[in-house]
Image: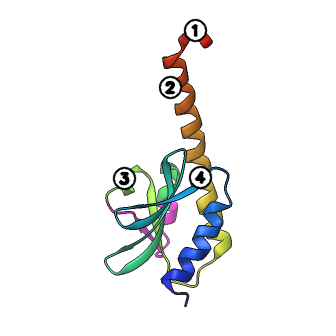
Amino acid sequence: MLSEAQILERLRKTCRDLPGASETVTFGHPTFQVNGKTFSVLEEYKSELGICVKVEKELQAIFLADPRFFPTPYIGKHGWITLKVHAAPLTWTEIKALVRGNYGLVAATGSRSKEATKRKQNPSAI
């Protein structure tokens, strides 16, 4: 079984390999962001270490049918899920796919938000 430090190091490498990704700490948890928006968090909740990512709302129920996942506290209603890292042996291929999927959702949203802000600030540039 991997330690929390080992899991964080693997997650850190997965996240930092993505363009524009950065690491910060929010509410005491290592948090990975792109364009200032969170796409993955490593956190402990009720003594359960988990990797949190957002999935499309339509897919959330599929993940939650798997006992390794639960709705991320407070933000699960927005599509966030948490993978219990010690519920079963970790499959890093699966974790990378989850992280990259959410990164894609967040990065696309951030790009659209930046473009909307530019248009509002300089409507004549359109």
Q: Of residues 17 and 102, which is closer to you in this image?
A: 17
How far separated are the C-alphas under marks 1 and 4?
A: 32 Å
Residue ID for mark 4: 103
Question: Which label belongs to residue 117?
Answer: 2
Magenta stretch contains residue 88: no
Question: Which label belongs to residue 77?
Answer: 3
The numbered mark, 3 or 2, whose residue comes first in the sequence reads 3
Where is residue 10 shown, x and y percent of the image? 61, 75
Q: Residue furthest top?
A: 124
Label pair 3/1, CB-CB below 8 angstroms: no
Residue at 38% x, 79% y: name it. Answer: 48
Instruction: Determine whether the residue tagged by mark 2 lies in a helix, strand or loop.
Output: helix
Where is residue 96 shown, x and y percent of the image? 64, 66
Mark 3 surroundings within 10 Å by alpha-carbon count, few (fewer than 14), some (14 through 19), many (20 or more): few
Left or right for 46, reference 6: left
Q: Is residue 102 above or below residue 11?
A: above
How far separated are the C-alphas under marks 2 and 1?
A: 13 Å
Label pair 4/2, CB-CB below 8 angstroms: no
Residue 17 seen in render: yes
